[in-house]
């Protein structure tokens, strides 16, 4: 047989389009041509494949070799096609039999010795192969990722092992799932001294999936609270864990616990591309890496304003689309935003430590645009601890607050109520669903409208307040949104009150 056909996969965002690898051995001067819009890393496969075949005790054919990676208009990059090209040459030169090769998809890079090396994006590739009812052949390093998909995957360590498997001379082990590693980071909400209101707001944010802004002087525990927010969230479902794992797989990253919601905390020097995603060959940014988890932005005003404003659309659409001349890539970005900041350049807004004038504070807060701040359904002031709190805690006489596990139980119960009522969390309710599930009495509606007028809030804030009130009601087990739920929801608009007081 002078012609061989095999299947492989390219990567386009988090999708894995099919690539048909065609290998033809023809007459003429010996040569090796690789066509089908290959990038430089793919073109270099010629040398890797030649050495791998020779070092695996096969003969490299002295013929005119043409390898086509179709479709020709799809860009190909990386070493993921090495194994398929090598097998195609061996089948076309009749050194091995390949009648059943079309039942498999092969993606692995070859070392010069013939060993298999891991590649990025195994999860999207395995999922796509599973839809086509094909098995996959991968490197042993990629087996844990592949096992997450449920696709039938065979694991090999070298080209020689794959050839022996195709010749039915030996069997290959199937990919094994890694043992579920429940990470123990030792964090607990009871570690935080005082800050009862902040803990309450974190519970509400976790229950409804609302974005939260923590404002307060340095050293009040804002970052500490944000880190422990993750201990209140339930584990990801299998579907959501697979979505998140696919994004990390594309980036060549792995996590210790796939079922734990991701937590990302980029530095404030991060660029728009690093945060949102992009580049010449579009890659996921921090918002996609925090898909189904939390993105924590500390020292919020230190981020460039344009970078923060680029988050506005993904916060609404839960995805980011990156357009380039060659193609367009969409990455999922369904994340919860938690942010922390000081209320002024000096860090204090009142008291003896205050050194900033109202004008300086306004200029400082002016780094954040109004539409961006509108995306925070919750914002609170995190005050300094009362004098004597640390001394009492050091002597061991203070009582610890509720543990994360106890708060998490209430959060899970509230989320179950929301899923049974509307099949989504409260933060994702549309305006029509807000009217349906957050109905108020006439007196309560008039009360809320009057409060919003006095605070100078937007129409977007109306829906945010009702969604937060709905979450508070769910935590309390109430079927209706009552006045006390609205009052508590209004109490968590610290940034609006701060801006209004400064402008007045």
Image (cartoon, rainbow, N blue to C red):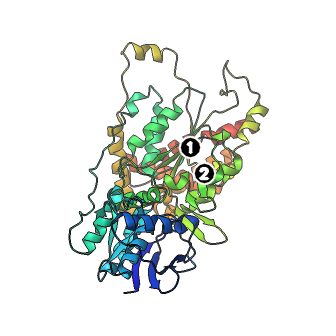
In the image, 470 versus 271, the foreground residue is 271
Q: How many marks?
A: 2
> What SS does tag 2 mark?
helix
Q: Is residue 440 left or right of residue 453?
A: left
Q: Position of residue 371 (x, y in %)?
A: 67, 53
Q: Residues within 10 Å of mark 1 (few under 14, many from 20)?
A: some
Residue denoted by label 2: 274
Can you tell which quarter of the image residue 199 is in? top left
Asked whether residue 444 appears in the rendered view, the answer is: no
Residue 286 locus on image (x, y percent): 54, 51
Image position of 262 (left or right of 284): left
Disc 2 to disc 1: CB gap under 8 Å: yes
Q: CA distance from mark 2 to mark 1?
A: 9 Å
Residue that label 1 marks: 266
Question: 132 or 424: which is nearer to us?
Answer: 132
* Quarter that holds the C terminus: top right
Which sits in the foreground, 370 or 72? 72
């Amino acid at each position: 047989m002078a012609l061989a056909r095999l299947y492989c996969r390219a990567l386009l965002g988090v999708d894995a389009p099919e690539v048909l690898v065609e290998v033809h051995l023809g007459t003429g001067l010996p040569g090796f041509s690789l066509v089908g819009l290959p990038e430089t890393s793919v073109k270099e496969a010629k040398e890797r494949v030649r050495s791998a075949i020779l070092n695996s005790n096969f003969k490299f054919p002295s013929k005119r070799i043409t390898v086509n990676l179709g479709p020709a208009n799809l860009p190909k990059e990386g070493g993921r096609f090495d194994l398929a090209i090598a097998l195609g040459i061996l089948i076309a030169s009749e050194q091995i039999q390949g009648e059943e090769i079309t039942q498999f998809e092969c993606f692995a890079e070859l070392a010069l010795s013939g060993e298999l090396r891991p590649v990025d994006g195994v999860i999207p590739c395995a999922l796509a192969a599973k839809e086509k009812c094909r098995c996959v052949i991968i490197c042993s390093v990629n087996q844990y990722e592949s096992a997450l998909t449920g696709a039938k995957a065979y694991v090999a360590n070298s080209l020689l092992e794959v050839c022996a498997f195709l010749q039915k001379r030996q069997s290959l082990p199937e990919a094994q799932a890694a043992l579920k590693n429940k990470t123990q980071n030792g964090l607990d909400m009871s570690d935080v001294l005082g800050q009862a209101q902040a803990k309450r707001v974190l519970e509400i944010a976790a229950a409804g999936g609302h974005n939260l802004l923590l404002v307060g002087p340095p050293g009040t525990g804002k970052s500490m609270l944000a880190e422990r927010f993750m201990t209140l969230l339930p584990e990801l479902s299998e579907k959501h864990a697979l979505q998140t794992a696919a994004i990390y797989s594309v980036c060549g990253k792995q996590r210790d616990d796939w079922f734990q919601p991701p937590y990302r905390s980029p530095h404030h020097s991060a660029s728009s591309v690093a945060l949102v995603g992009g580049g010449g060959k579009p890659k996921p940014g921090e918002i996609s890496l925090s898909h189904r988890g939390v993105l924590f932005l500390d020292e919020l005003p230190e981020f460039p304003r344009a970078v923060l404003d680029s988050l506005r659309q993904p916060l609404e659409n839960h995805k980011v689309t990156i357009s380039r001349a060659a193609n367009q890539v969409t990455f999922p970005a369904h994340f919860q935003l938690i942010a922390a900041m000081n209320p002024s350049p000096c860090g204090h807004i009142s008291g003896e430590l205050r050194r900033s004038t109202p004008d300086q504070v306004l200029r400082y807060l002016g780094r954040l645009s109004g539409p961006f701040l509108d995306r925070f359904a919750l914002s609170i002031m995190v005050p300094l601890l009362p004098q004597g709190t640390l001394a009492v805690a050091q002597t061991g006489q203070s009582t610890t607050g509720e543990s994360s596990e106890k708060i998490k139980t209430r959060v899970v119960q509230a989320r179950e109520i929301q899923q049974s009522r509307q099949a989504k969390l409260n933060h994702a309710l549309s305006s029509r669903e807000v009217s349906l599930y957050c109905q108020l009495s006439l007196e309560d509606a008039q009360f809320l409208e009057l409060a919003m007028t006095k605070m100078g809030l937007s129409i977007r804030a109306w829906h945010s307040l009702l969604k937060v009130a709905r979450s508070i009601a769910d935590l309390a087990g109430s079927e209706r949104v009552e006045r006390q739920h609205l009052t508590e929801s209004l109490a968590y608009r610290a940034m609006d009150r701060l801006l209004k007081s400064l402008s007045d």
